Image: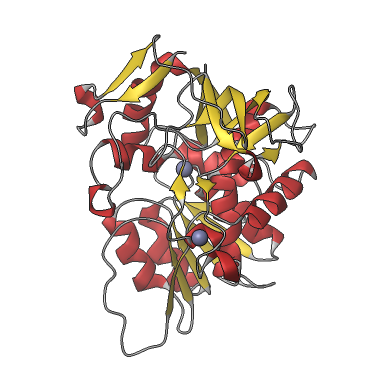
Amino acid sequence: MRAQVLQRIAPIEDGPLQYSSSVEDPKVGPHDVLIKIKACGVCHSNLHMIEGEFRVFGVPSKLPIIPGHEITGVVAETGADVEKWHVGDRVGVQVLYEACGTCEFCLTGREQLCVNKKVTGETVDGGYAELIAVPSDFVYAVPENLHAEEAAPLFCPGVTAYRAVKRADVRMGNKVIVLGVGGVGHMSLQFAKLAGAEVVAVDRSPGALELARDLGADVVIPPAELDEHVSKYGKPDVIFVHAPAQPAIDQAFKSIKRGGTVLMAVLGKISVVFPEEYSVVTSVIGTRSDMLETLKLAAMGKVKVKAKSFPLSEASLILERLKRGEIAGRAVLVP
Ligand SMILES: [Zn+2]
Ligand SMILES: [Zn+2]
């Protein structure tokens, strides 16, 4: 099959990702389904892995590896013991490739924290490819009314934003600021609206602000105007930090209301906030039930994905553009 294969850890401009037409097809175990991939989203965390920022977490756990973890496609083959899925079913794969089902976290409904979990495109081969084999219990039906390319980002930014809004405990009437309207940010602003919040979206890019307004943000402003906005209209109850930049994190802790919550969805240093009370919450992808709820809300039209498609062969180029902050919403690779 054809695939984008990460050969070594290096800046994306140095060409560590190689497009190959002679990658061995994945092996299909008795409990697996083989998926013919129709789309795979390009995530900032793919870039973090490629450039070595995840090495401290032991990611990638193997090289070479095929990145990519927000996947939609069609079932092409089923393992001998698979009953639930059939050839031709439209399905998706999220970041959580498999959980053990027996550890403390799996047994308490927090399987995304599983100590033995496998992660799509980070510990096992992912979706920058034509095919992927996935355990059948970790495959989800793609709603009929969603196109494969618009559905793919639901499997990482969608479920991540859904769980983050729950974790941050956004309530009706809350004021919420979303810093960074990229892949996850454009989804969390919609889930925060669904939860009944007033949403202020902040981004450097005019295109991202336009997108935020289209998706229902009440106020859209560039970062330079945030201080003035807060002093004029009041501090927010919740801030989502989706912009992977230290100034955004510092801004969040400067702007949050006493008793409020900062949801950190990026890597960075947290400044000291004593002597007031604040909550700092992190969140990591979502469980299978979070995933199903995310898909249901998308099928109902309650949240919309902004996806733009590119050929799989252009993965490196797209990752470079993502690095420069030039992608509004989500870029999706099509084999
Ligand atoms: Zn992702
Ligand atoms: Zn487990």
Residue 143 percent coordinates (x, y): 76, 36
Q: Nearer the viewer, residue 58 or 171?
A: 58
Q: Is residue 226 left or right of residue 308?
A: left
Which of the two residues, 103 or 263, is positioned nearer the viewer here?
Answer: 103
211 lies above or below 111: above
Nearer to the camera, 215 or 36: 36
Residue plotted at (23% across, 42% down): 52
Q: How many marks?
A: 0
245 over 68 or under it: above or below: below
Q: Quadrant of residue 194?
A: bottom right
Query: Can residue 175 be seen in the rendering of this structure?
Result: no
Residue 108 appears in the picture as rendered: yes
Q: Please give the name of the residue rendered at 32% of the width and 56% of the height, measured from the top-left corner.
A: 267
Residue visible at 47% across and 21% down in the picture: 129
Q: Residue at x 63, y 53 (%)?
A: 288
Q: Position of residue 88 (x, y in %)?
A: 74, 22
Q: Residue 108, position in %: x, y?
A: 59, 71
What colouring method underlies this structural image? Answer: secondary structure
Image height check: is 4 above or below 99?
above
The image shows residue 141 at horizontal and vertical percentages of 73, 38
- 64 relative to 146 in the view: left or right: left
Q: Residue 120 or 107: which is nearer the viewer? A: 107
Looking at this rendering, what residue extends furthest in the top direction?
21
- The quadrant in which residue 144 appears is top right
